[in-house]
Image (cartoon, rainbow, N blue to C red):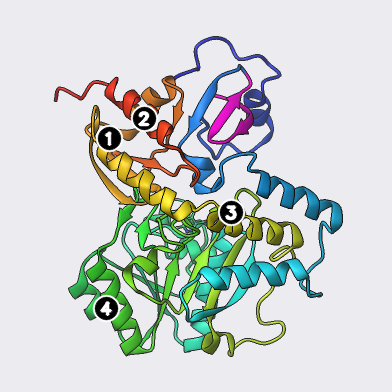
């Protein structure tokens, strides 16, 4: 790994975390101390261009004045109240979110994370349809909780629970015939990431996604779009389903939603919302005022700073300039991109990190992920292209 040369001091957070937290994360060999714009500044004074955004969270980069002001003002004014009371800032966050979602999604349930959003979406689908089979897509990722993990491909490695809460089957991705055969009147819902993030920013085909929509509709099953990673502008649209003209029954989102403040949301139609009453769903922290203020600031910034257009321009620039060195092709959309490499992506990530650029690996061994802040600038892409150019293509 780059940057590991030289002894690490005993009081370094890497040593202290290793001694006090569960050893479940492989950590990168640097310690961020602060960040500004798209750069991380490390404890040993390096400036690293962050094209990974903390797993697609830092939508506005770091230190964006609208977000930091909103958070600090809200924390001084009213740090927390639960859903036992209505709040102006929560109402605003819900209105903003409904305003950018596909038209039919008119209701929001706020939660704290992507997995919690999916957990509730799946519960809602079972309740609304009174069915107990969920279909998911091969290679998909939906989170680590009991229901979300049950619909995640290959989760048996870490799932841990004695059984799943419902029957699960996986549709081979992009296989329209299999989808048509598998979606029957016993299916409560199909859950799908329109762009499979953890799988390496693999964008499912328009034909496959529209087949899922048609078959779910015809069989009384719900279409759940998991836009935890692809949502909130990352695909160049507010939500990736919008570029397919698809209106899901339920949509989940999280990650970039609060720009770094933990939060998530489940959006659904009025018809689905009508099945739920007091006490049917719940969470203490979901929709808290700090998260709500962050959600408002993120959505307003995307609008005010024209970030959807910026995402599309940076995508075009990356596609034009970055198929070089180890990169053979690019998949995905917007700033959820998979750079398919001629060698293990971990090697390319390490080589880029030696050149002060942070990217991420994915579930696909040769695919490197770009999950850059939506505020990425043209010169950052030039920097990436130059760095890739300096890494020799493999001779194999
Ligand atoms: C598509 C998708 N769904 C759900 C999740 C789970 O989100 P969280 O880690 O916030 O629980 C993730 C996380 O990577 C994700 O990419």
Neighbour class for label 2 at 10 Å: few (<14), some, many (≥20)? Answer: some
User: Which residue: 52% across, 78% down?
Assistant: 268
Q: Are marks 4 and 1 in contact (CB under 8 Å)?
A: no
Residue at image coords 38%, 42% = 369
Q: Which residue is mark 3?
A: 301
**Mark 3 residue's CB less than 8 Å from ligand 1:** no
Q: Does mark 1's beta carbon lie closer than 8 Å to ligand 1? A: no
Whether residue 21 appears in magenta in the rendering, the answer is no
Q: Residues within 10 Å of mark 1 (few under 14, many from 20)?
A: some
Q: Main secondary structure of the magenta part?
A: strand
Residue 110 point in image, percent of width and height: 64, 68
Instruction: Of the two numbered discs 4 and 3 on the same chain, state the one appearing first in sequence.
Output: 4
Q: CA distance from mark 4 to mark 2?
A: 46 Å
Earlier-in-chain disc, 1 versus 2: 1
Question: Residue 182 — which label?
Answer: 4
Image vertical order of residue 186 relative to residue 233, above or below: below
Q: Label 3, secondary structure: give it.
A: helix
Query: Which stretch did the figure color magenta?
Result: 29-43
The residue wearing badge 2 is 382
Indicate the secondary structure of the residue bearing disc 4.
Answer: helix
């Amino acid at each position: 790994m780059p940057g590991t040369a030289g002894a690490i001091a005993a009081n370094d957070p890497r040593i202290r975390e290793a001694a006090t937290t569960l050893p479940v994360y492989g950590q990168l060999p640097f310690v961020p101390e602060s960040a500004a714009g798209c750069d991380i500044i490390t404890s040993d004074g390096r400036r690293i261009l962050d094209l990974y955004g903390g797993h697609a969270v830092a939508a506005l980069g770091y230190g964006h004045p609208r977000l930091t002001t909103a958070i600090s003002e809200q924390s001084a004014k009213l740090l927390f109240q639960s859903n036992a009371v209505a709040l102006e800032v929560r109402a605003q966050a819900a209105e903003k979110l409904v305003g950018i979602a596909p038209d039919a999604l008119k209701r929001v349930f706020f939660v704290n994370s992507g997995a919690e959003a999916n957990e509730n979406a799946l519960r809602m689908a079972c309740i609304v349809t009174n069915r107990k089979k969920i279909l998911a897509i091969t290679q998909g990722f939906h989170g680590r909780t009991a229901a979300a993990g049950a619909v995640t491909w290959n989760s048996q490695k870490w799932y841990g629970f004695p059984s799943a809460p419902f029957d699960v089957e996986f549709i081979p991705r992009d296989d329209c015939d299999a989808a048509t055969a598998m979606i029957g009147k016993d299916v409560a819902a199909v859950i799908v990431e329109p762009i499979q993030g953890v799988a390496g920013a693999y964008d499912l085909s328009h034909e496959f996604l529209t087949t899922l929509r048609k078959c779910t509709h015809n069989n009384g099953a719900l279409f759940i779009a998991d836009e935890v990673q692809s949502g909130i502008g990352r695909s160049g649209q507010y939500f990736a389903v919008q570029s397919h003209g698809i209106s899901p029954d339920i949509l989940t989102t999280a990650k970039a939603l609060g720009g770094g403040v933990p939060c998530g949301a489940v959006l659904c139609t009025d018809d689905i919302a009508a099945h739920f009453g007091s006490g049917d769903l719940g969470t203490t922290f979901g929709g808290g005022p700090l998260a709500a203020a962050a959600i408002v600031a993120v959505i307003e910034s995307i609008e005010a700073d024209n970030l959807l257009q910026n995402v599309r321009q940076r995508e075009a620039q990356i596609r034009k300039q970055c198929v070089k060195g180890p990169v053979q092709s690019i998949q995905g959309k917007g700033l959820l991109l998979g750079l398919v490499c001629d060698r293990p992506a971990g090697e390319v990530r390490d080589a880029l990190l030696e050149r002060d650029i942070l990217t991420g690996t994915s579930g696909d061994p040769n695919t490197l992920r770009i999950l850059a802040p939506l505020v990425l600038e043209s010169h950052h892409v030039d920097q990436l292209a130059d760095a890739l150019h300096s890494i020799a293509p493999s001779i194999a």
